[in-house]
Every structure is written in C-alpha cells, then in structure tokens.
Amino acid sequence: NEECLHYASCQPERFAKGFTGFRKQMYPVQYDKFMSALACQFGRNKYFKYRKGTVLLPPEEQYMIRHVLEQCGANPDMEFDEYIEAIHWK
C-alpha cells in the first residue's frame, strides 16, 4: 500500500517528450534566460537531453519548466513537443 517506503503506483502519468518548439515562441532574450536557468538546474547535458526528448520529463519537471517559463516572461502554457502515458518509477 501507499504507506510502504517502496510503494509505486501503477497508474500511468503524463510524461513530456522534448520542448524544441519553445524557442520559436519566445524572444531571444527570454530563451537565453530560460536556457541558462534550466542548464543550471539540470546540468548542461541533461538539459539538452530533456530539450531534444531523449529523456522523458516527469510531471514534477514539467511543472518546474513551466515555472521557469513564467519567470522569463514567456507563456507558461506552451505545449511540449509530445506527451506519453507511462508508469512513473520514482
């Protein structure tokens, strides 16, 4: 049950795959701030893997990215490149 330390729900969650389209919808200054903030948060390599869609973005990371978009003055409701339903093995 949920009280167990090793419990993982078998309910699928919505993962995002890539956000290369964000750049087209932002001003260059906004995108530079956005990219710098995420590269500091995730590290440069992981940032590029997330951006390209090589590594799926769990819901928590999507929320954080939307927060950074808002801080940069961009629309936080932009859609990620693709969405996938999968089980979140934390």
Image (cartoon, grey):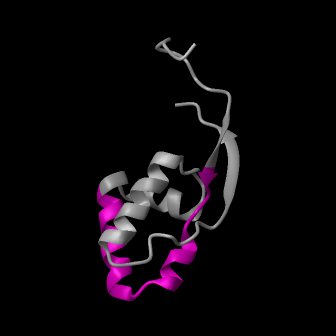
User: In the current view of this chain or complex, which residue is farthest to the bottom?
Assistant: 27
Asked whether 42 falls inside the magenta stretch, the response is no
Task: In the rendered view, tell whether residue 15 sits above or below residue 27.
Answer: above
Residue 50 place in picture, x, y as percent: 51, 57
The residue sitting at 30% across, 64% down in the picture is: 37
Residue 2 appears left or right of 63: right
Q: Which residues are magenta?
A: 15-40
Dominant secondary-structure state across the stretch colored magenta: helix
Name the residue rendered at 58%, 23% in the picture.
8
> Is 2 above or below relative to 23?
above
Q: Is residue 16 magenta?
A: yes
Where is residue 64 drawn, in percent x and y?
A: 39, 55
Residue 56 seen: yes
Q: Residue at x 62, y 58 (%)?
A: 17
Quadrant assignment for the N terminus:
top right
Q: Is residue 45 visible?
A: no
Residue 82 higher or lower than 2, as above or below: below
- Horizontal side of residue 22 vs 27, given as left or right: right
Residue depicted at x 67% and y 62%: 82
Q: Nearer the viewer, residue 77 or 61?
A: 77
